[in-house]
Image (spheres, rainbow, N blue to C red):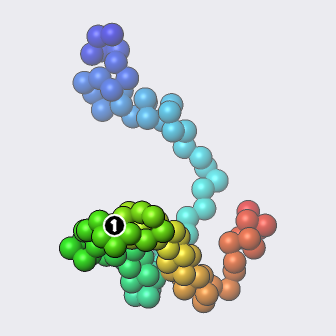
């Protein structure tokens, strides 16, 4: 394929035609304003990140063994299970004050 007939060829016109063919523009898009997340939601989202990334020096050891696995593997497994709980709590904090729930918004769409 030569550069002249390549979809992402030398001109921007070719690229815009290529992009609009791949991603067609919809006329009925409804735009909504996005709120800034609350401090509580941000902190709940950062807890698992900090627990896994910045606490390595606390749990980087094999002993003690918990439930037959090394402590570091146990620590990461526990946070693998706790992360969705923290993110669910952040979601609940964000949607607590909203009048319309996500299910109500789906019904109106």
Instruction: Examine the rendering and report whether any part of residue 76 can be seen.
Output: no
Instruction: Examine the rendering and report whether any part of residue 3 can be seen.
Output: yes
From the viewer's perspective, is residue 12 above or below residue 44?
above
Residue at horizontal 69%, vertical 77%? 101
Residue at horizontal 27%, vertical 27%? 11
Q: Count the numbered circles shown.
A: 1
Q: Position of residue 72 (x, y in %)?
A: 33, 66
Q: Looking at this rendering, what residue extends furthest in the left direction?
A: 57
Q: Looking at this rendering, what residue extends furthest in the top direction?
A: 1
- Residue 105 left/right relative to 87: right
Q: Position of residue 82 (x, y in %)?
A: 50, 73
Q: Where is residue 68, by image quadrant?
A: bottom left
Q: Where is residue 62, by image quadrant?
A: bottom left
- Residue 24 left/right relative to 28: left
From the viewer's perspective, is residue 80 above or below residue 7?
below
Q: Position of residue 50 (x, y in %)?
A: 31, 75
- Name the quadrant of the C terminus: bottom right
Residue at horizontal 33%, vertical 26%? 8
- Name the quadrant of the N terminus: top left
- Residue 24 left/right relative to 43: right
Observer-nearest residue: 49 or 97? 49
Q: Position of residue 3 (x, y in %)?
A: 27, 16
From the viewer's perspective, is residue 9 above or below residue 2?
below
Observer-nearest residue: 57 or 49? 57
Q: Where is residue 103, by image quadrant?
A: bottom right
Q: Which residue is mark 1?
A: 72
Q: Find numbered disc 1 in the image and state the secondary structure of the residue it sits on.
A: helix
């Amino acid at each position: 394929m030569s550069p002249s007939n390549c979809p992402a060829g030398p001109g921007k016109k070719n690229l815009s035609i290529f992009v609009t063919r791949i991603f067609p523009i919809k006329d009925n898009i409804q735009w909504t304003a996005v709120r800034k997340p609350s401090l509580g939601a941000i902190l709940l989202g950062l807890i698992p990140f900090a627990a896994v990334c910045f606490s390595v020096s606390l749990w980087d050891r094999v002993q003690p063994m918990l439930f037959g696995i090394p402590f570091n593997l146990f620590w990461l497994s526990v946070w693998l299970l706790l992360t969705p709980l923290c993110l669910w709590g952040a979601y609940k904090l964000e949607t607590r004050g909203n009048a319309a729930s996500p299910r109500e918004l789906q019904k109106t769409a």
